[in-house]
Amino acid sequence: MATTDPIADYLTRIRNAMQARHRVVEIPSSKMKKSITEILYDQGFIHKYRFDDSAGKQGVISIALKYDKATKEPIIRKMGRVSRPGLRKYSSVDELPRVINGLGVAIVSTSKGVMTDKQARKENVGGEVICYVY
């Protein structure tokens, strides 16, 4: 079954895996999902990741989730979809959202590629706000 919103499916799979305390989650791959995964890794939200393009028709992303050593709680507290197929949310560079006063990350799809809200401000570009992570 093809999902109508693959990004929401991606976020839900990560949320469900963290709730079930899984170490690794496997998600069908796409360019957008690969970009989001790289941002999550660069921002320190996930332990590591691997792209396996040989598996299946579109490939698979394996993500090693990260948990707090002391409390065993997931590092990612919340992941939320902002712009969805039925209601797209675009922001100019001045209106880019600040997630928890800069502690969280808004992932934005711009004309210069997928990046965090901070990078988009630095590059002075707006775009479609894909999701929040904190």
Image (spheres, rainbow, N blue to C red):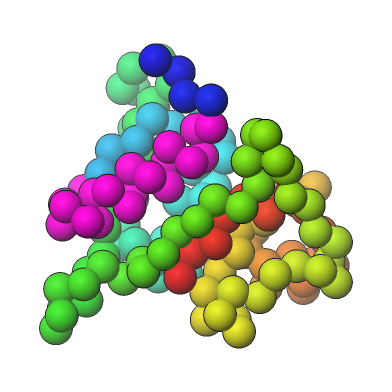
- Quarter of the image where one finds residue 99: bottom right
**Would residue 67 be visible to someone looking at this image?**
yes
- Residue 33 in percent (x, y) is at 50, 41
Q: Residue at x 47, y 24 (%)?
A: 3
Viewer-closest of 123 and 3: 3
Q: Main secondary structure of the magenta part?
A: helix
- The answer to if 92 sits in the magenta stretch is no
How many dots with numbers?
A: 0
Q: Where in the figure is residue 19, as x and y percent of width and height? A: 22, 56
Task: Assign the N terminus to one quadrant of the image.
Answer: top left
89 left or right of 54 in image: right
Screen quadrant of the C terminus:
bottom left
What residue span does the magenta drawing correspond to?
5-24
Within the image, what quadrant is residue 73 found in? bottom left
Lateral position of residue 51 relative to residue 95, left or right:
left
Q: Is residue 39 left or right of residue 60?
A: right
Identity of the residue drawn at 70% across and 41% down: 87
Q: Is residue 122 above or below residue 126?
A: below
User: What x and y, as percent, mark residue 16?
Assistant: 27, 48
- Residue 11: say if magenta: yes
Residue ID at (45%, 18%): 2
Instruction: Residue 42: tell me if it is visible.
Output: no
From what the image shows, is residue 14 above or below residue 79? above
**Residue 32 drawn above or below residue 78:** above
Vertical position of residue 107 compared to residue 76: above or below? above
Q: Nearer the viewer, residue 120 or 131?
A: 131
